[in-house]
Image: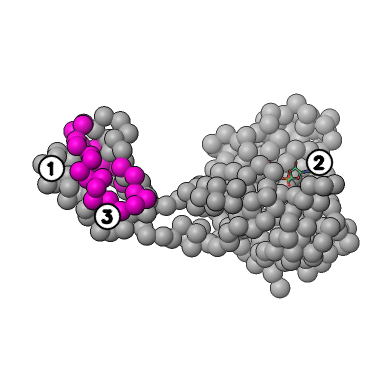
Amino acid sequence: MDAVEVTGVVVRYGDTTAVDGVSLSVPRGQVLGLLGANGAGKTSLLQVLGGFRRPDAGTARVLGLDPFGDHDELMPRIGVMLQSGGVYPWVRAGEILRLFASFAAHPLELDPLIDRLGLRPKLGTAYKRLSGGEQQRLALALAVVGRPELVFLDEPTAGMDPAARHATWELISELRADGVAVVLTTHLLDEAERLSDSVVIVNKGRVVATGTPAELTAVAGIERLTIRAEPDLPLARLREKLPDGVELTECAPGEYSVRGRLATDTVAVVLSWYAAEGAHVTGVNSERRTLEDVYLALTKAAA
Ligand SMILES: Nc1ncnc2c1ncn2[C@@H]1O[C@H](COP(=O)(O)OP(=O)(O)OP(=O)(O)O)[C@@H](O)[C@H]1O
């Protein structure tokens, strides 16, 4: 049994269908990255999984239970970090953390958690008086302090500074290594690529792609080639040799960019043209297709 099993889940708000028949699963010890534009339905789906909302159709099973009907039984076994709130504005950071730890049978040790999320100087501060990034760090600490078997993290690193973001990535990797299942939403596609075992891209409430980051980005190798040489080379003659869909520009003086799905022979054509021109090449840089490229292509196509 997977930690999360979702089949055909629908969430409606009046006439708006926010989640339109989503199916997915998350095995234990794996991180699922849930990606999609603003309003794609990610938070609504997490609300179903966290047991805060009953789906209008379809079924959701979390650790084998019904997240809405078995909410009380599930609460101690899952950790939830939703966008904004869930914390009384005037309660102090240290108090709420100790309170959450007291609900758990085997909470994490508080001191290391406080230090790694940089919360020590803020323990006496009321939630409302924390900065946005500090509230996020506290919310993350609250989600994991009870040693959950499964965590739902809705844009956990939004608003965090780089140090907090790295600490969060480390924490997520450790949870995964401990066998915890993680469902993560993020708008940072490099973050999704770095952390996720599998990725689900949703658009207007529907799943438009599923796979590992490697599967989703695996197409004919190189996506972009940047070549540095002298400026103003006669590109028209090289353009004639390139296949359709490959774009060649001098994006800055002496910096040439070749974009598209670049098969090995296209790369060879480009580099041999520079050689034949007698160009003085001072740099060649290649980039593979990123999850961001895939995401943008898919969401544009679906629109
Ligand atoms: N309580 C609500 N009442 C009415 N419509 C809602 C409500 N919550 C969300 N919606 C609508 O449902 C759709 C999906 O919203 P949701 O918050 O699930 O998207 P999201 O993918 O989490 O977006 P974001 O990336 O901006 O957080 C949106 O069109 C939104 O306007």
Residue 281 at x, y percent in the picture: 18, 40
Report, in whole angstroms, how far the alpha carbon at label 1 lies from the one at label 2.
64 Å
Q: Earlier in the sequence, mark 3 or mark 2?
A: 2
Instruction: Classify mark 1 as within 8 Å of ligand 1 or not, answering yes or no.
Output: no
Mark drawn on residue 198: none
Q: Which of 33 and 138 is in front in this view?
A: 33
Report, in whole angstroms, how far the alpha carbon at label 3 lies from the one at label 2.
54 Å
- As for residue 240 lying within the magenta part, the answer is yes
- Amino acid type at mark 2: Gly
Instruction: Tell me the quarter of the picture where residue 32 sits.
Output: bottom right
Span highlighted in magenta in the image: 225-248
Asked if the residues shown at circle 1 and circle 2 are in contact, with their CB atoms under 8 angstroms apart, the answer is: no
Instruction: Tell me the quarter of the picture where residue 155 sits.
Output: top right
Name, please, the residue furthest toward the bottom: 1
For mark 3, does the 10 Å Cα neighbourhood hold few (<14), some (14 to 19), or many (20 or more) residues? some
Kindly identify which residue carries mark 1: 277
Quarter of the image where ligand 1 sits: top right
- Amino acid type at mark 1: Glu
Name, please, the residue furthest toward the top: 129
Report, in whole angstroms, how far the alpha carbon at label 1 lies from the one at label 3.
17 Å
Q: For the point 59% across and 52% down, which residue is it? A: 302
Residue 263's place in the image compared with 36, above or below, is below
Instruction: Classify mark 2 as within 8 Å of ligand 1 or not, answering yes or no.
Output: no
Q: Seen in the image, is 217 located left or right of residue 273?
A: right
For mark 2, does the 10 Å Cα neighbourhood hold few (<14), some (14 to 19), or many (20 or more) residues? few
Q: For the point 83% across and 44% down, which residue is it? A: 99
Q: What element carries label 1?
A: loop
Q: Which of marks 1 and 3 is nearer the N terminus?
A: 3
Kindly identify which residue carries mark 3: 266
Kindly identify which residue carries mark 2: 86
Residue 229 at x, y percent in the picture: 20, 36
